[in-house]
Image (spheres, rainbow, N blue to C red):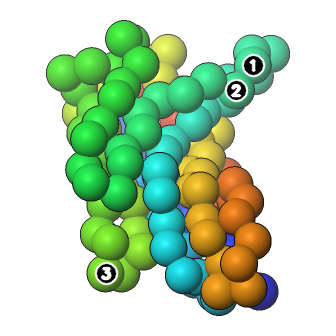
Amino acid sequence: QLQLVEPGGGLVRPVGSLRLSCAASGSIFRIYDMGWYRQAPGKQRELVAVITSGGSTNYADSVKGRFTITRNNTENTVELQMNSLKPEDAAVYYCNADIDRKDGTQEWYWGQGTQVTVSS
């Protein structure tokens, strides 16, 4: 069973920092792009950051300069370092990954989501 697991999340004060992590496990042959999305109440899910297998990154304008996405291709993990958090960053954060399975199929997988609350 292939899955993405996201421990972490939590409550943080404005201008504080939080680090999210996500680990992929199961019958994995190769992982292509990995990313983080978020969804706030009443809003659509939006891309936060994405990183290719080669390490190229792309960020939503709203988080540029504050968030950093990294990955470990050996451990099949992706992390999101979030600094200078704002109340509008509060959302459920989801990791996702484009994965080649060992059976030859390729599919996007999603984590279960983790709540990030930014409040004083």
Dot 3 or dot 2: first in sequence order is 2
Q: Amino acid at mark 3?
A: Thr
Drawn side of residue 94 relative to residue 89, left or right: right
Return the residue found at the far front: 104
Helix, strand or loop under label 1: loop
**Residue at x-position 47% and y-position 29%:** 48
Q: Is residue 64 above or below residue 31?
A: above
Q: Position of residue 106 (x, y in %)?
A: 70, 64
Q: Amino acid at mark 1?
A: Gln
Helix, strand or loop under label 3: loop
Q: Which residue is mark 3?
A: 74
Mark 2–mark 1 CB contact (< 8 Å): yes
Q: Which residue is mark 2?
A: 45
Of residue 78 and residue 74, the one placed in the foreground of this image is: 74
Q: Position of residue 1 (x, y in %)?
A: 77, 86
**Residue at x-position 55% and y-position 28%:** 47
Dot 3 or dot 1: first in sequence order is 1
